[in-house]
Image (tube, helix red, strand yellow):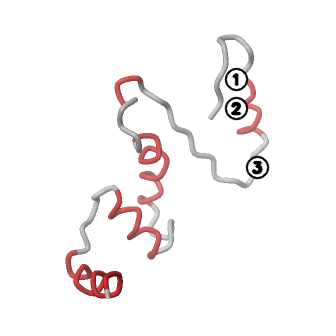
Amino acid sequence: MIRGEPGIGKTALLEYAVASADGMRVARVVGVESEMQLTSALVYQLLAPMFENPDLPPARQRGAVASAFRLIIPCAKLPALWKARFA
């Protein structure tokens, strides 16, 4: 997160970083004042596009993130998870 007064070069710094990121994946998010109270809105913005690529993130992390954002509810796995967690 970059914070600062208007005009100090925040955007220029970010544009330089993107231009210098040859061969790297660059992800951008934009904060919206109306989403300020939604604590994971920016994280969702950052991770949601990765679900379009079936290889990213790996299956285990994909399931965890999807479940956290309630994109899927792994109902079939819940009993086994509860047994392992609360045994």
- Residue 32 falls in image quadrant: top left
Q: Residue at x 46, y 47 (%)?
A: 43
Q: CA distance from mark 2 to mark 1?
A: 6 Å
Image quarter (top left, top right, bottom left or bottom right) of the N terminus:
top right
Where's residue 73, x and y in %?
24, 68
Where's residue 36, x and y in %?
40, 29
Reading the image, the residue beneath label 2 is 14
Q: Amino acid at mark 2?
A: Leu
Where's residue 34, x and y in %?
35, 25
- Residue found at the far top of this picture: 7
Q: Are marks 3 and 2 in contact (CB under 8 Å)?
A: no
How many marks can you see? 3
Decide if residue 57 is on the left or right side of residue 35: right
Image quarter (top left, top right, bottom left or bottom right) of the C terminus:
bottom left
Nearer the viewer's eye, disc 1 or disc 3? 1
7 shown above or below 14: above
Q: Residue at x 28, y 87 (%)?
A: 83
Decide if residue 30 is on the left or right side of residue 87: right
Q: Earlier in the sequence, mark 1 or mark 3?
A: 1
75 shown above or below 4: below
Residue at disc 2, secondary structure: helix
How many neighbours does mark 3 have within 10 angstroms: few (below 14), some (14-19), or many (20 or more)? few
Residue at disc 1, secondary structure: helix
Q: Amino acid at mark 3?
A: Asp
Where's residue 46, x and y in %?
49, 47
Q: CA distance from mark 3 to mark 2?
A: 14 Å
Reading the image, the residue beneath label 3 is 22
